Amino acid sequence: MANQDLKELADREYKYGFKSDIETDQVPRGLSEDTVRMISAKKNEPAFMLEFRLKAYKHWLTMTEPTWAHIHYPKIDYQNVIYYSAPKAKKKLNSMDEVDPEIRATFDKLGIPLDEQKMLSNVAVDAVFDSVSVATTFRKTLAEAGVIFCSFSDAVKECPELIEKYLGSVVPYTDNYFAALNAAVFSDGSFCYIPKGVKCPMELSTYFRINAKDTGQFERTLIVAEDGASVSYLEGCTAPMRDENQLHAAVVELVAMDDASIKYSTIQNWYPGDKNGKGGIYNFVTKRGKCAGKRSKISWTQVETGSAITWKYPSCILLGDESVGEFYSVALANHYQQADTGTKMIHIGKNTKSTIISKGISAGHGQNTYRGQVKIAKSAVGARNFSQCDSLLLGSDCGAHTFPYIEVGNTTATLEHEASTSKIGEDQLFYLRQRGLSTEDAVGMIVNGFCKQVFAELPLEFAVEAHKLMNISLEGSVG
Amino acid sequence: MLKITNLHAKVGEKAILKGINLQVKPGEVHAIMGPNGSGKSTLSYVLAGRPGYTVTDGKAEYNGQDLLAMDPEIRSREGVFLAFQYPVEIPGVSNKYFLKAAYNAQRKHRGEPEMDAGAFLKFIKEKAKSVEMDPAMLNRSVNEGFSGGEKKRNEVLQLAVLEPKLALLDETDSGLDIDALKVVAAGVNRMRDPKRAFVVVTHYQRLLDYIVPDYVHVLSGGRIIKSGGKELALELEKKGYGWIEEKVAA
């Protein structure tokens, strides 16, 4: 039946898979204390940074790669990865016009023009290419509002005291294997600081692009919102199509003080590998937010359509009384993609509240796992959580798995958990086709309907993107 | 408009239709009646192209084209509409959005420009009024949480929006109380047109009091065993299906 059409639909190609030919400055393959020192030296970092990196590196050596996730991949040879790769800068850049034309062209092709006139007027972008940030737009406009938004490297130079204070304060380098690795070798990322009482005047966004071959990307994002501040931040990611798997191990730390709110949205579209499962990005990411202040709020929204393997659990530590944590997720696993994703909500403060809405879509031979933890500490009087995990299966060779962990240490807490698994209905497809929609449009409509609750949380400009991305990623998905 | 010749079809391995012959001209309303399991719904699904319903012999011509060779969406765009007995729920997709996508798919097929959101909204609000549907239902997910009557009304709304040439109504009366039945029938009657044909599949005569057919056919054992005018339906109501079946068997 329509299975054939669905299959063709699933087999469409990844459109961001092109490579750019750019001269790069790389460190030699492999990881040692020297590599770590070399990266730090290349970036002219202050002593505290080198110290942080070395401690992390030494700790990493004592750790072993985690194996508990529901994912399978050949052993990674960490000595065969290039840990730092940067486009060779001809000279120091004074303005956006001086960005290497080849890099500008790359971002143009990705639909992220770095030219401020051409951009979405209310979105500031930090563009990260391989290991370094190549451009940040609207810095001046933001500075007038008191907002700092720049590359991590610039932040280390321009406001080292903030970096020293918050770096590793939410995700310590001891946290897990990949977080330790990141802490040792991370090269760039974005930093964002919203001072007291300021509502960030525009959407902030970072666009990550992996280009060079055999390199890993290890970026770090740190966002701090002071008392009463608020910000909405979005990250997008793509990579060329390569036969080899590439490692991406990022760390994101968020800190929200009293009455502050941070909305963090991700549209992750790393190269997923080809339809036979060859190549693709290993996306091993640690994201965590700390609601440090009273009535603070951190909201994660993620649309995960790319990567060969996704291993990430954007979490919230609800420390402040009455703080709120949210997690809205759509994860798609098509072809041979594997996604093990979810969240942790750690309730510590009184009357803290969390919401988890997870939508997993599996197609082809894709395996999709929701893994979530809700922990209510003894101190969390009156804590509340609502979790909803829905899985949609397209075809019969894919899988959906759910691992909810619940730990309650206070009897006044209220927890609700709802879960469902359904197969895309032949009757739904026929109904829509009988009204004149093609199979492709019908599948897109059903899947987008399934994801609606999550897409509704995205900033408007990106909700439309997410819709389209979902349709493209589903191409050839159902068998 | 529609010419069915010696149509045989199976569902899975089971032969259901065993030689249907039927001719429908523009402007006509044909009622297909018959006991449960006689193949009424199968006939509508086969004509609409539902996957899993395999034609094993015979043909169906639609305006001179081979209907059975077309994909379901092409049949729809060419003007064949099936009002479902059990309309399907599509969670998260608003009725309005769905209707617009369907309507524009049809327009595109005819080489007409797509209607923009504003104009379409006005258009469907009027259509909704014509089937006495609360406009708030346009914002709800397609059929999700609709009552039986609301679902059927929604089918008639789609009929009114898409303005097909050939409408197949599959047990549109099932699950309706008398008031809902009247509204649905009125919606259908408003669509009657010298250029449009209807094939109304029903188990009961009741619907035919409101949608008065030109022809009535009795389907049994996968064949049309008797055809006649609207009086035939009344006779069936009185005597049941048994007497014709016996007569045919004899």
Image (tube, rainbow, N blue to C red):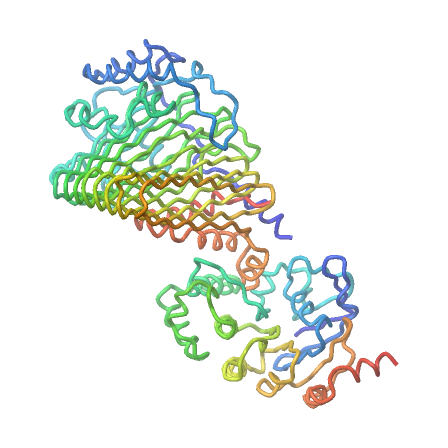
Pick out the residue farthest to the top. Answer: A34
* Residue appearing at x 19%, y 30% in the figure: A95
Q: Position of residue A332 (x, y in %)?
A: 47, 42
Q: Nearer the viewer, residue B21 or A39?
A: A39
* Residue appearing at x 25%, y 13% in the figure: A41
Which of the 4 quarters of the picture holds residue A381?
top left
| Above or below for A36 versus B47 | above
Q: Position of residue B109 (x, y in %)?
A: 53, 62
Q: Position of residue A454 (x, y in %)?
A: 38, 49
Q: Position of residue A314 (x, y in %)?
A: 35, 37
Pick out the residue farthest to the right. Answer: B250
Q: Is residue A376 left or right of residue A137?
A: right
Q: Nearer the viewer, residue B74 or A164?
A: A164
The reply to whether residue B153 is visible in this rendering is yes
Count of numbered marks: 0
| Above or below for B201 versus A438 | below
The reply to whether residue A118 is visible in this rendering is no
Q: Nearer the viewer, residue A114 or B189?
A: B189
Which image quarter holds the C terminus of chain A? top right
Which of the 4 quarters of the picture holds residue B139?
bottom left
Which of the 4 quarters of the picture holds residue A425?
bottom right
